[in-house]
Amino acid sequence: MIKKANIKVIILAGFIGGFISSLVKSGTEVNMPPRIPGEISPPSANIDSWLGWLGINSHSLDYVYQTVTISGAVMLYHWVFSFIFAFIYVAGSAIFPKIRLWYGAAYGIIITLVMHGLLIPALGFRHPAYLDGKIGWLWNLNGYEFWSELLGHICWSMSIELSLIAILALLAKPLKGYWTN
């Protein structure tokens, strides 16, 4: 695995996949918001809990774009995770090709189950307003939140796979014909 060509694939596909997938995940949440307005998101709760002692909170990097306040810290948090999980996917696919099952959709399903079904609730970062204080385990989530997260992560992971396919094709052979002009 540690060959110059493989490292090039991992770096290029990891960066491109991380960049594109972060935009894809944000885009799916615009169309299908996983939470009701005013409800704290798991990344916000996480940032406030883990970085609050440093004076950093979920609103530390807020900015206004066309009169809309954007939570910059939460966006950065999602971007960092997209890059990390894209690198894990790309590097992992060289060792465990089954990770690419269904064009990466299986990876998105696994991430949803692990993160939103187990890790986020176990750490106490999900208490949906509609559950009256109960922990937001996967089986407690309403259909809107569940489908938003599941479909969002499937689109997100498939965009990493498409980035990997593009980089593998780009590095495998030169393009000929009108494509190069």
Image (tube, rainbow, N blue to C red):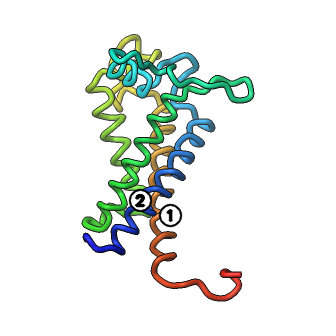
Residue at 42% of width from left, 63% of height from top?
102
The image quadrant of residue 101 is bottom left
Q: Position of residue 10 (x, y in %)?
A: 37, 63
Q: Position of residue 27 (x, y in %)?
A: 60, 42
Look at the numbered discs 1 and 2 and tell me whether their residues touch, using CB distance below 8 Å.
yes
Circle 1 sits in a helix, a strand or a loop, which is it?
helix
Discs 1/2, front: 1
Q: Position of residue 180 (x, y in %)?
A: 66, 81
> Which numbered disc flags the more N-terminal residue, 1 or 2?
2
The image quadrant of residue 122 is top left
Badge 1: residue crowd in 10 Å (few <14, some 14–19, many ≥20): some
Badge 2: residue crowd in 10 Å (few <14, some 14–19, many ≥20): many
Q: Label 1 belongs to which residue? A: 162
Q: Is residue 179 above or below residue 14?
A: below
Residue at 47% of width from left, 19% of height from top?
40
- Residue 104: give its label: 2
